[in-house]
Amino acid sequence: MTLPQPKTKIQAELLRWFNKHHRDLPWRKTKDPYAIWVSEIMLQQTQVATVIPYYEKFLKTFPTVRSLAKAHLSRVLKVWEGLGYYSRTRNLHQASGMITNRFNGKIPDTLKDLLTLPGIGRSTAGAILSIAYNREAPILDGNAKRVLSRLFATSGNPIRGETEGLLWQLSESLLPKGRAGLFNQALMDLGAMICTPKDPKCIKCPLCDFCKAHASGEPESFPLKKVRKKIPHIKAVSAVIRKDGKVLLRQRPPKGLLGGLWEFPNWPIDGKKDLMEYLWLKVKSDLGLEVKGKVLLGTFQQTYSHFKLTLSVFQGKYLDGEKAGSWVPLRKLHSLPLSRIHRRISESISYRGIDKKSD
């Protein structure tokens, strides 16, 4: 396609800016496709500052794709714990096995092959191809979408239909031959550092003279903002059941929200109920357990991408019954992968000292 702006000037100015102002990031110090793939998966929906320590720990624990493939999923989830969006972990682990078996441990270097791997879409594949293999493959992550939408003042929804197709064409058409990896990283850095969602620093932008959104006087009007739906507020109750210095945990199914993580037994509340009475009735009916000494441990909150959770947590001592879960010594809770809210519960009971065997 024919660009409506001076292509070579855009390329030159952006690369010149990137050379002076690029972010010093650990995954930019390697050309290892595996390390770059890990970083790109971690950076999906997560800020750079949050990712860095997880990235370094992950690569130290699983330095190669084969070491990741050999590891048990529970161990991989534990190393990932706290980074959120755990489907990324499961996809990464599954893909490592596919790479080991189908591609002899080598990260694919074609778009077609990369797109066969779980968790890799066109933009992530483009980043891997351009940065690790210096292929002329475009990207269109959130930062790139915003920069290109403003640069060319595109109208319409940037995440679907004709507008998204146009942005892909623009991203691909701008790639300088032989420098696609640098250009894509520059595009991402510009969006993260200068062309931010709110209060863009237009005066510092190397592409300011070419930017149609800036010329309009309303750069924040681009891209078109989606209407955010109010997320539901879910209330639930959870049981910390003690037995001889151990607590009862259950593991979530391998697929779905927080798949594979461990948690204290919990149930959603539908309507107004006496929380304690409802919880221990569920413990008896669903777990077949008799419990005594029921007290409130506390109320914990967590906001996920699609809902907000308020969890009222009660503890009690096991008396009798068949368990539906695993008795885990409190001192070993740190070794299991837990979601953030259940990790906070485990820390709370540890601080209270109920790990003693004098129940």
Image: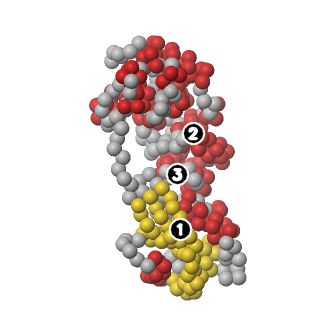
Between 260 and 314, the residue placed more toward the observer is 314
Q: Are marks 2 and 1 in contact (CB under 8 Å)?
A: no
For image coordinates 57% across by 79% down, the residue present is 295
Q: Earlier in the sequence, mark 2 or mark 1?
A: 2
Where's residue 47, x and y in %?
54, 41
Q: Report helix, strand or loop for mark 1.
A: strand
Where's residue 19, x and y in %?
59, 20
Q: Is residue 302 above or below residue 167?
A: below
Identified by mark 2, the residue type is Val
Identified by mark 3, the residue type is Gly
Residue indicated by mark 1: 299
Where's residue 142, x and y in %?
44, 35
Residue indicated by mark 2: 48
Q: Tell me the quarter of the image containing the N terminus.
A: top left
Residue indicated by mark 3: 84
Please tell me how crowded label 2 is: few (under 14), some (14-19), or many (20+) other residues with Cα within 10 Å. Answer: some
Mark 3 vs mark 1, foreground winner is 1
Q: Earlier in the sequence, mark 2 or mark 3?
A: 2
Q: Earlier in the sequence, mark 3 or mark 1?
A: 3
Mark 2 vs mark 1, foreground winner is 1
**Which numbered tag is attached to residue 5?**
none
Is residue 301 at least partly visible in the picture?
yes
For image coordinates 46% across by 19% down, the residue present is 208
The image quarter in which residue 332 lies:
bottom right
Please tell me how crowded label 1 is: few (under 14), some (14-19), or many (20+) other residues with Cα within 10 Å. Answer: some
Q: Are marks 3 and 1 in contact (CB under 8 Å)?
A: no
Decide if residue 352 is on the left or right side of residue 302.
Answer: right
The image quarter in which residue 165 lies:
top left
Between 262 and 96, the residue placed more toward the observer is 262
